[in-house]
Image: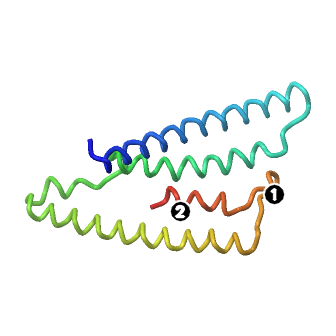
């Protein structure tokens, strides 16, 4: 296995592991909050915010997992109607537009992260810097 494929494989495993662990932690925190609220009449003030931001990270990292597994929804009606040669060009054009869109998304998400670093925004309950939340866009979006 080439060095590049080895790194790609490790990155895929890291992404999938991150998603799995984060989903388990979110589930545990929400479950603990429910038990605390209804059994002990107390709750974690930060649980809902943690779950919200955790789901954002899972969504964006999960989107990249769907890309490399080929699980995103596609319009494949053209594949059945067009000749293989024209279909190949159609895919090239569609992938080019997708790459340009991802590039623009990445650029603007980095601008958002930079802006939140400069303004020093923090989350309400957790007190975390907002650039950690917005970082999900830059890391998983493209």
Residue 80 percent coordinates (x, y): 14, 53
In the figure, 83 relative to 73: above or below?
Answer: below
Residue extending farthest right: 41
Depth order, front residue of 29/9: 9
Q: Mark 2 packing: few (<14 Cα in 10 Å), some, or many (20+)? A: many
Using the rendered view, name the quadrant where residue 133 is placed. bottom right
Q: Which residue is mark 1?
A: 124
Q: Residue at x 22, y 66 (%)?
A: 92
Quadrant that contains the N terminus: top left
Mark 2 or 1, closer to the camera: 2
Q: Residue at x 58, y 50 (%)?
A: 57
In the figure, 29 relative to 40: above or below?
Answer: below
- Badge 2 vs badge 1, beta-carbon distance below 8 Å: no
9 with respect to 62 (left or right): left
Q: Which residue is mark 2?
A: 138
Depth order, front residue of 67/12: 12
Callout 2 secondary element: helix
Depth order, front residue of 141/9: 9
Residue extending farthest top: 39
Residue 70 percent coordinates (x, y): 32, 47
Depth order, front residue of 83/13: 13
Q: Which mark is residue 134?
A: none
In the figure, 78 relative to 109: above or below?
Answer: above
Using the rendered view, name the quadrant where residue 78 is placed. bottom left
Mark earlier in primary sequence (2, 1): 1
């Amino acid at each position: 296995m080439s060095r590049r494929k080895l790194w790609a494989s490790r990155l895929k495993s890291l992404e999938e592991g991150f998603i799995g662990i984060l989903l388990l932690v979110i589930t545990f925190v929400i479950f603990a909050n429910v038990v605390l609220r209804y059994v002990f009449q107390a709750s974690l003030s930060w649980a809902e915010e943690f779950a919200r931001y955790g789901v954002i990270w899972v969504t964006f990292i999960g989107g990249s997992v769907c890309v490399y597994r080929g699980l995103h929804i596609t319009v494949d009606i053209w594949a059945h109607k067009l000749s293989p040669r024209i279909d190949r060009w159609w895919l090239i054009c569609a992938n080019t537009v997708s790459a340009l869109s991802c590039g623009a998304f990445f650029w603007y998400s980095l601008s958002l992260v930079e802006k939140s670093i400069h303004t020093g925004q923090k989350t309400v309950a957790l007190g975390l810097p907002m650039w950690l939340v917005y970082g999900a866009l830059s890391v998983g979006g493209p």
